[in-house]
Image (cartoon, grey):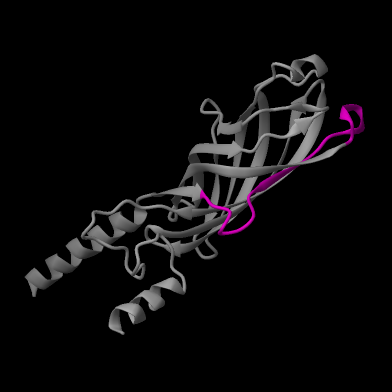
Amino acid sequence: MKTFFACSVILFALSTSLFADPVSRTAIFDPTIGPNNYTIQFPLELSGATVDMNIVGGSFELVVDEDEGTAALASWHQEIDPIMLFGMSTGPITITMDAEQPASGTYNAETREFSVEATFNIEFDDSQLWQVGFVSPVNLTAVEEGTIHGSGSIGSVIMHLAGEGEFAGGTFSYTCNTSARFDYDLEAFQAQPGDVNQDHFHDISDPMAILSELF
């Protein structure tokens, strides 16, 4: 009886410590999961134009703590297609998190929703755009809200950002809808449960792979 009680206490302590640890997920921006784009609205003094920017690559690391109800960004890197401003190209655009600014917020374990406030830096080729006051890098502030779908090391994160930044002496606003998938790296003899064909997705191709193997 004492042995059983001792083992129960140990198992409870282990399970408590395991669930108490923050969970870190590295996700890759993936347009096949959902939208991945920025919409920037410039004020009238900065032409009043609306500009769309497509996210074509990158990843981020999100850390959530269910017990504490907190969320934080450990890293953020986005690759954006070039856009034309005033007839001049920005060249490839990158957006990264400002490591010197805290990027933290809240997490709801029941709904798996998070909200994180962060500061980002947008960098581009300003060799021509500096003439009209568009100088790289530019600071962006935003509140990022999203929901985590899936579990373990496979799933998706759907997010929405809204914020503002300063450009050429004026303030612009922007929104960003991003979709990302968890990535994992397993040995050749291992597989993520449910991902039969090991393509990093849980979709119709998995039962099709089973049927193909059987018949």
Q: Is residue 22 above or below residue 85?
A: below
> Closer to the camera, 101 or 59?
59
> Which residue is located at x 30 percent, y 78 percent?
213
> Left or right: where does residue 5 sit relative to residue 195?
left
Outermost residue on the bottom side: it is 215
> Closer to the camera, 161 or 65?
161
Query: Residue 162, percent across and down?
Result: 71, 44
Q: State how many labels appear.
A: 0
Queried whether the magenta region covers residue 10, the answer comes back as no
Q: Quadrant of residue 46?
A: top right
Queried whether the magenta region covers residue 42, the answer comes back as yes
Q: Is residue 126 above or below residue 37?
A: above
Name the quarter where the C terminus is drawn.
Answer: bottom left
> Which residue is located at x 32 percent, y 63 percent?
192
Name the quarter where the N terminus is drawn.
Answer: bottom left
> Left or right: where does residue 42 sit relative to residue 207?
right
Q: Quadrant of residue 125?
A: top right
Query: Residue 15, percent across and down?
Result: 27, 61
Q: Report the magenta residues as a range.
A: 29-48
Q: Is residue 127 above or below residue 157?
A: above
> Which residue is located at x 66 percent, y 39 percent?
142
> Left or right: where does residue 84 sit relative to residue 152?
right
> Which residue is located at x 75 percent, y 16 percent?
130
> Closer to the camera, 34 or 160?
34
Query: Residue 91, percent across and down?
Result: 65, 28
